Amino acid sequence: MSDEMMKRIELNGAELGYSTYGVENGKKALVFVHGYAMRSTGPLYEELLTRLSKRYAVYALDLRGHGASRDSWADWSFETLADDIVAFVETLRLDQPVFVGHSFGAPVGLFTEIRRPGTFSAFCLLCPGPADHRRDPVDALKFMIENGRNRDVLRPGFDGMFVRQPSPWTEATLDAVTSLDSGVHLALQAANPLFSIDDQLKDVAAPALLIRGEADPVVPPAIQHDMACKLPRCKEVVYSTEGHMLPIESALIVAREIDAFLADPPSY
Protein backbone atom coordinates (compact mmCIF):
# COMPACT_ATOMS: atom_id res chain seq x y z
CA MET A 1 0.00 0.00 0.00
CA SER A 2 1.11 3.56 -0.57
CA ASP A 3 2.57 5.50 2.35
CA GLU A 4 -0.29 7.97 2.59
CA MET A 5 -2.83 9.85 0.52
CA MET A 6 -1.94 10.97 -2.98
CA LYS A 7 0.24 14.08 -3.04
CA ARG A 8 0.33 17.08 -5.36
CA ILE A 9 3.21 19.18 -6.58
CA GLU A 10 3.31 22.30 -8.78
CA LEU A 11 5.88 22.12 -11.58
CA ASN A 12 6.22 23.98 -14.89
CA GLY A 13 2.82 25.57 -14.58
CA ALA A 14 1.08 22.26 -13.87
CA GLU A 15 -0.24 20.60 -10.72
CA LEU A 16 0.84 16.96 -10.85
CA GLY A 17 -0.29 14.10 -8.64
CA TYR A 18 1.93 11.33 -7.31
CA SER A 19 2.01 8.59 -4.68
CA THR A 20 4.90 7.27 -2.61
CA TYR A 21 5.70 3.77 -1.41
CA GLY A 22 8.31 2.86 1.19
CA VAL A 23 9.97 6.26 1.29
CA GLU A 24 12.51 5.82 4.06
CA ASN A 25 16.00 7.15 4.70
CA GLY A 26 18.76 5.18 3.07
CA LYS A 27 16.72 3.67 0.23
CA LYS A 28 17.56 4.27 -3.41
CA ALA A 29 14.87 6.37 -5.10
CA LEU A 30 12.82 4.95 -7.96
CA VAL A 31 10.49 6.96 -10.21
CA PHE A 32 7.64 5.07 -11.87
CA VAL A 33 5.63 6.32 -14.88
CA HIS A 34 2.52 4.64 -16.28
CA GLY A 35 1.44 3.72 -19.80
CA TYR A 36 -0.48 6.08 -22.08
CA ALA A 37 -4.02 6.90 -20.89
CA MET A 38 -3.34 5.06 -17.64
CA ARG A 39 -2.14 6.30 -14.24
CA SER A 40 0.61 5.55 -11.71
CA THR A 41 -1.56 6.52 -8.72
CA GLY A 42 -4.46 4.25 -7.80
CA PRO A 43 -4.82 0.46 -7.95
CA LEU A 44 -3.46 -0.53 -11.37
CA TYR A 45 0.23 -0.79 -10.49
CA GLU A 46 -0.12 -0.95 -6.72
CA GLU A 47 1.06 -4.56 -6.35
CA LEU A 48 4.21 -3.92 -8.39
CA LEU A 49 5.01 -0.66 -6.59
CA THR A 50 4.40 -2.20 -3.17
CA ARG A 51 6.78 -5.05 -3.98
CA LEU A 52 9.44 -2.64 -5.27
CA SER A 53 9.10 -0.52 -2.13
CA LYS A 54 10.69 -3.27 -0.04
CA ARG A 55 14.07 -2.17 -1.44
CA TYR A 56 13.41 1.24 -3.03
CA ALA A 57 11.77 4.55 -2.16
CA VAL A 58 9.11 4.57 -4.90
CA TYR A 59 7.67 7.77 -6.39
CA ALA A 60 4.74 7.01 -8.71
CA LEU A 61 4.05 10.02 -10.94
CA ASP A 62 1.01 10.77 -13.08
CA LEU A 63 2.07 12.59 -16.26
CA ARG A 64 0.21 15.81 -17.04
CA GLY A 65 -3.22 15.08 -18.44
CA HIS A 66 -3.36 11.64 -16.77
CA GLY A 67 -4.85 10.33 -13.56
CA ALA A 68 -4.46 12.71 -10.64
CA SER A 69 -2.77 15.18 -13.04
CA ARG A 70 -5.63 15.10 -15.55
CA ASP A 71 -6.63 18.75 -15.08
CA SER A 72 -3.15 19.95 -16.09
CA TRP A 73 -2.97 19.00 -19.75
CA ALA A 74 -2.18 22.42 -21.24
CA ASP A 75 1.13 22.69 -23.15
CA TRP A 76 1.21 18.89 -23.48
CA SER A 77 4.18 17.69 -25.55
CA PHE A 78 6.99 15.17 -25.23
CA GLU A 79 9.33 18.01 -24.32
CA THR A 80 6.99 19.24 -21.59
CA LEU A 81 6.59 15.74 -20.16
CA ALA A 82 10.36 15.32 -20.00
CA ASP A 83 10.82 18.72 -18.38
CA ASP A 84 8.12 17.85 -15.84
CA ILE A 85 9.98 14.67 -14.88
CA VAL A 86 13.30 16.49 -14.52
CA ALA A 87 11.62 19.15 -12.36
CA PHE A 88 9.97 16.40 -10.29
CA VAL A 89 13.33 14.73 -9.63
CA GLU A 90 15.04 18.03 -8.82
CA THR A 91 12.28 19.45 -6.63
CA LEU A 92 12.11 16.30 -4.51
CA ARG A 93 15.92 16.16 -4.46
CA LEU A 94 16.11 12.61 -5.74
CA ASP A 95 19.73 11.68 -6.41
CA GLN A 96 19.93 9.93 -9.80
CA PRO A 97 16.93 7.70 -9.18
CA VAL A 98 16.11 4.56 -11.11
CA PHE A 99 13.44 5.08 -13.79
CA VAL A 100 10.75 2.45 -14.32
CA GLY A 101 8.27 3.03 -17.15
CA HIS A 102 5.47 0.97 -18.65
CA SER A 103 4.52 1.20 -22.34
CA PHE A 104 4.35 4.92 -23.29
CA GLY A 105 6.13 5.81 -20.06
CA ALA A 106 9.28 3.96 -21.14
CA PRO A 107 10.24 6.12 -24.17
CA VAL A 108 9.21 9.25 -22.24
CA GLY A 109 11.76 8.29 -19.58
CA LEU A 110 14.46 7.63 -22.19
CA PHE A 111 13.71 10.97 -23.86
CA THR A 112 14.04 12.66 -20.46
CA GLU A 113 17.52 11.18 -20.09
CA ILE A 114 18.49 12.19 -23.63
CA ARG A 115 17.22 15.71 -22.99
CA ARG A 116 18.93 15.90 -19.57
CA PRO A 117 21.74 13.31 -19.36
CA GLY A 118 22.48 11.96 -15.89
CA THR A 119 18.96 12.38 -14.54
CA PHE A 120 18.64 8.63 -13.96
CA SER A 121 21.09 5.93 -12.88
CA ALA A 122 19.28 3.01 -14.56
CA PHE A 123 16.19 2.20 -16.62
CA CYS A 124 13.62 -0.58 -16.34
CA LEU A 125 11.46 -0.56 -19.48
CA LEU A 126 8.30 -2.64 -19.21
CA CYS A 127 6.67 -3.58 -22.54
CA PRO A 128 7.95 -0.26 -23.94
CA GLY A 129 6.25 1.80 -26.59
CA PRO A 130 8.20 2.64 -29.75
CA ALA A 131 11.19 4.96 -29.74
CA ASP A 132 9.92 6.30 -33.04
CA HIS A 133 6.30 7.33 -32.55
CA ARG A 134 5.75 7.47 -36.27
CA ARG A 135 5.27 3.72 -35.80
CA ASP A 136 2.21 4.30 -33.61
CA PRO A 137 -1.06 3.06 -35.10
CA VAL A 138 -2.73 6.28 -36.23
CA ASP A 139 -6.13 4.62 -36.50
CA ALA A 140 -5.99 3.62 -32.83
CA LEU A 141 -5.35 7.21 -31.74
CA LYS A 142 -8.15 8.47 -33.98
CA PHE A 143 -10.41 5.88 -32.37
CA MET A 144 -9.46 7.19 -28.91
CA ILE A 145 -10.21 10.77 -29.92
CA GLU A 146 -13.66 9.78 -31.13
CA ASN A 147 -14.55 7.32 -28.36
CA GLY A 148 -12.36 8.24 -25.40
CA ARG A 149 -15.28 8.61 -22.96
CA ASN A 150 -17.33 5.62 -24.10
CA ARG A 151 -16.55 2.69 -21.79
CA ASP A 152 -18.70 0.22 -23.72
CA VAL A 153 -16.94 0.95 -27.00
CA LEU A 154 -13.46 0.94 -25.41
CA ARG A 155 -13.94 -2.13 -23.22
CA PRO A 156 -13.25 -4.92 -25.79
CA GLY A 157 -9.99 -3.34 -26.93
CA PHE A 158 -8.59 -2.73 -23.48
CA ASP A 159 -9.82 -6.07 -22.15
CA GLY A 160 -7.96 -7.70 -25.03
CA MET A 161 -4.67 -6.24 -23.78
CA PHE A 162 -4.77 -8.67 -20.85
CA VAL A 163 -3.62 -12.25 -21.34
CA ARG A 164 -5.70 -13.73 -18.53
CA GLN A 165 -9.43 -13.57 -19.19
CA PRO A 166 -11.72 -12.34 -17.85
CA SER A 167 -9.42 -9.66 -16.47
CA PRO A 168 -10.18 -8.10 -13.07
CA TRP A 169 -8.23 -5.02 -14.22
CA THR A 170 -10.28 -3.92 -17.22
CA GLU A 171 -12.65 -1.63 -15.32
CA ALA A 172 -9.84 0.08 -13.38
CA THR A 173 -8.04 0.62 -16.70
CA LEU A 174 -11.17 2.16 -18.20
CA ASP A 175 -11.53 4.41 -15.14
CA ALA A 176 -8.13 5.91 -16.01
CA VAL A 177 -8.63 5.98 -19.78
CA THR A 178 -12.02 7.72 -19.72
CA SER A 179 -10.77 10.41 -17.32
CA LEU A 180 -8.41 11.86 -19.95
CA ASP A 181 -9.32 15.10 -21.66
CA SER A 182 -9.46 14.69 -25.44
CA GLY A 183 -6.86 17.47 -25.63
CA VAL A 184 -4.22 14.92 -24.59
CA HIS A 185 -5.09 12.63 -27.50
CA LEU A 186 -5.08 15.57 -29.90
CA ALA A 187 -1.69 16.74 -28.60
CA LEU A 188 -0.23 13.26 -29.06
CA GLN A 189 -1.70 13.09 -32.55
CA ALA A 190 0.06 16.38 -33.39
CA ALA A 191 3.35 15.25 -31.82
CA ASN A 192 3.53 11.73 -33.27
CA PRO A 193 4.70 12.65 -36.80
CA LEU A 194 7.58 14.59 -35.28
CA PHE A 195 8.76 12.54 -32.31
CA SER A 196 11.56 10.00 -32.61
CA ILE A 197 14.48 9.14 -30.34
CA ASP A 198 15.41 6.05 -32.34
CA ASP A 199 18.76 7.43 -33.48
CA GLN A 200 19.57 8.73 -29.99
CA LEU A 201 19.15 5.51 -28.04
CA LYS A 202 22.86 4.87 -28.50
CA ASP A 203 23.52 7.93 -26.34
CA VAL A 204 21.78 6.52 -23.25
CA ALA A 205 24.75 5.58 -21.08
CA ALA A 206 22.82 4.21 -18.10
CA PRO A 207 22.18 0.45 -17.89
CA ALA A 208 18.72 -0.67 -18.98
CA LEU A 209 16.47 -3.65 -18.40
CA LEU A 210 13.78 -4.31 -21.01
CA ILE A 211 11.04 -6.79 -20.09
CA ARG A 212 8.48 -7.78 -22.71
CA GLY A 213 5.91 -10.42 -23.52
CA GLU A 214 5.74 -12.28 -26.81
CA ALA A 215 1.92 -12.17 -26.61
CA ASP A 216 1.85 -8.34 -26.70
CA PRO A 217 -1.01 -7.18 -28.97
CA VAL A 218 -0.26 -3.45 -28.52
CA VAL A 219 3.41 -2.93 -29.40
CA PRO A 220 4.90 -5.50 -31.79
CA PRO A 221 7.61 -7.56 -30.03
CA ALA A 222 10.00 -6.84 -32.90
CA ILE A 223 9.81 -3.09 -32.18
CA GLN A 224 10.57 -3.67 -28.49
CA HIS A 225 13.46 -5.99 -29.38
CA ASP A 226 14.84 -3.32 -31.71
CA MET A 227 14.91 -0.85 -28.80
CA ALA A 228 16.82 -3.35 -26.66
CA CYS A 229 19.40 -3.83 -29.43
CA LYS A 230 19.99 -0.09 -29.81
CA LEU A 231 20.49 0.67 -26.13
CA PRO A 232 24.22 0.23 -25.37
CA ARG A 233 23.85 -1.49 -21.98
CA CYS A 234 20.55 -3.33 -22.18
CA LYS A 235 19.47 -6.68 -20.76
CA GLU A 236 16.38 -8.03 -22.52
CA VAL A 237 14.04 -10.47 -20.76
CA VAL A 238 11.23 -12.13 -22.73
CA TYR A 239 8.23 -14.07 -21.41
CA SER A 240 6.53 -16.15 -24.07
CA THR A 241 3.10 -16.24 -22.41
CA GLU A 242 2.88 -12.61 -21.20
CA GLY A 243 1.44 -9.57 -22.92
CA HIS A 244 1.34 -5.79 -22.77
CA MET A 245 -0.09 -5.60 -19.25
CA LEU A 246 2.71 -7.73 -17.81
CA PRO A 247 3.53 -5.32 -14.92
CA ILE A 248 -0.11 -5.43 -13.81
CA GLU A 249 -0.89 -9.10 -14.43
CA SER A 250 2.43 -10.51 -13.22
CA ALA A 251 3.78 -7.96 -10.74
CA LEU A 252 5.77 -10.54 -8.78
CA ILE A 253 7.72 -11.63 -11.87
CA VAL A 254 8.48 -8.04 -12.87
CA ALA A 255 9.54 -7.01 -9.36
CA ARG A 256 11.93 -9.97 -9.14
CA GLU A 257 13.49 -9.15 -12.51
CA ILE A 258 13.96 -5.49 -11.52
CA ASP A 259 15.48 -6.40 -8.16
CA ALA A 260 17.92 -8.84 -9.76
CA PHE A 261 18.89 -6.38 -12.49
CA LEU A 262 19.52 -3.44 -10.15
CA ALA A 263 21.57 -5.64 -7.86
CA ASP A 264 23.92 -6.49 -10.74
CA PRO A 265 23.43 -4.21 -13.79
CA PRO A 266 25.37 -5.01 -16.99
CA SER A 267 28.74 -3.26 -17.32
CA TYR A 268 29.09 -3.64 -21.12
Image (cartoon, grey):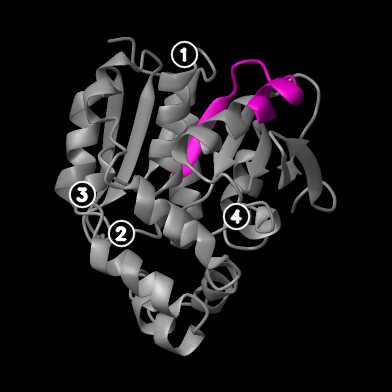
- First in residue order: circle 3 vs circle 2: 3
Q: Is residue 223 left or right of residue 167?
A: left
- First in residue order: circle 3 vs circle 4: 4
Q: Is residue 166 visible?
A: no
For the record, the magenta segment spans 87-102
Residue 201's x, y, as percent?
28, 23
Number of the label disc, if any, that sits on residue 65: 4
Q: Amino acid at mark 4?
A: Gly
- Secondary structure of the residue carrying tag 2 is loop
Considering depth in this image, is 109 or 31 the residue closer to the camera?
Answer: 109
Q: Amino acid at mark 2?
A: Glu
- Tag 1 near tag 3, CB within 8 Å: no
- First in residue order: circle 2 vs circle 4: 4
- Secondary structure of the residue carrying tag 3 is helix
> Which residue is tagged 3?
135
Q: Quadrant of residue 153?
A: bottom left
Q: Is residue 190 above or below residue 227?
A: below
Q: Is residue 101 left or right of residue 137?
A: right
Considering depth in this image, is 29 or 146 the residue closer to the camera?
Answer: 146
Which residue lies most toward the bottom here?
Answer: 152
Q: Is residue 159 visible?
A: yes
Asked whether residue 88 is drawn in magenta, I would say: yes
- Tag 4 near tag 1, CB within 8 Å: no
Which residue lies most toward the left here?
Answer: 222
